[in-house]
Image (spheres, grey):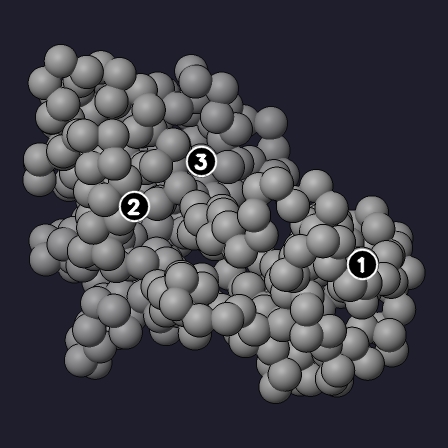
Amino acid sequence: MTYVSVLSELKKQTPRPLYLVTGNQPYLANQLRQAFRALVPESEQTMNFVTYDMETTPVAQALDDAMSAPFFGERRLVFIDRATFLTTEKGGKVDHDIDGLLQYIEHPEPTSVVVIFVTGKLDSRKKLVKTLKKQAEVVALEALGERQIQTLLADRLAVDGYTIDDPAFEQLQQRTGGDLTLMMNELPKLELACYDTKIITSSVVGELVTKTLDQNVFDLVNAVMAKKINAALTLYRGLILTKEEPLRINAVLVSQFRLLIQCQILARNGYSQGTIASTLKVHPYRVKLALQSLRHLQQVNLKRAYLGLIEIEKDLKSTSQDPMTLFELFMLKYASQAA
């Protein structure tokens, strides 16, 4: 079940007793939480709604609540957060009653709605996970496409009487790396700045929205590939001056060049933009930008840059050489070799 379909279902039908929400999409997860909470009248939420954090609380406590009858209401709502014991990650310090949870999953309380939130990768080898997938309604929160994001953004702004033009939306995407949660978080200050006109423009976005590290690195990648030594050095120096760790900068650079190489190979084999994003499990907007950049890039140059950055990583970890000097030497060498 998708984010859109579960929202529609919660408005029209009686909710199911058990939901499993997966995926690391904070904004979508928060919207789902609000939709689930709307199932319980606000006047009843004190007694019939509760949230449990599995990193600090045994699941048995959540099950006790779920098995209790609602207090002067139609249903009880129980959120089970950070259920990492369902994932491939190492378990925390809390000892959970897995057998008790299995039993509840197979025979859920009909007057309760239990929603389990998981952000990590589910461990499908576990009996608990297999049973949960079979018995619960699974809601997969995946990265949305550009049109879906634009629609959500426009709908959110329309509630407050605002609109955003296409150039402004594109720039907002660029500066946030297409991250829906970051985009939504920027809206309050953009609305405040455009209070008189109620129209959010690209000039306002450019003034108020700070570029993410990924976007700054994307600009740096373009400068590297274009052999613009001075521009690349200026961008790199700017990142250092903003207190970004050299190893982190280099890691993001390596990641970006790896993505470019992967996208180039997959595109040559007939993969579409959406298929590439799902295959590589990266945000669709990153793939879109990568494919746009690849129109002007040669594979041999991508490989040279990638291997050069791997060498910088080794030097950063094994020597005390100045990061700026290492990057400058890399640029000089790369620019002299590139075709």
Task: Indicate the quadrant where residue 126 lies.
Answer: bottom right
In the image, residue 332 lies at what x, y percent?
27, 34
Q: Which residue lies at the image location 80% right of the left edge and 73% below the top edge?
A: 101
Image x and y of residue 50, in percent: 71, 49
Quarter holding residue 288: bottom left
Q: Mark 1 = which residue?
A: 65
- Out of 22 and 295, give the one closest to the viewer: 22
Specify which label sits upstream in the sequence, 3 or 2: 2
Q: CA distance from mark 1 to mark 3?
A: 46 Å
Q: Which residue is mark 2?
A: 178
Expressed as whole percent of the image width and height from the top left, the position of residue 90 reads: 77, 61
Left/right of residue 232 with respect to residue 98 in the rendered view: left
Q: Quadrant of residue 178?
A: top left
Residue at figure coordinates x 63%, y 83% from the top left: 135
Front-most of 227 and 88?
A: 88
- Mark 2: amino acid: Gly
- The local crowd at label 2, few if under 14, some if 14 to 19, many if 20 or more residues have their Cα within 10 Å, is many
The residue singled out by tag 3 in the image is: 249
What amino acid is labelled 1 in the image? Asp
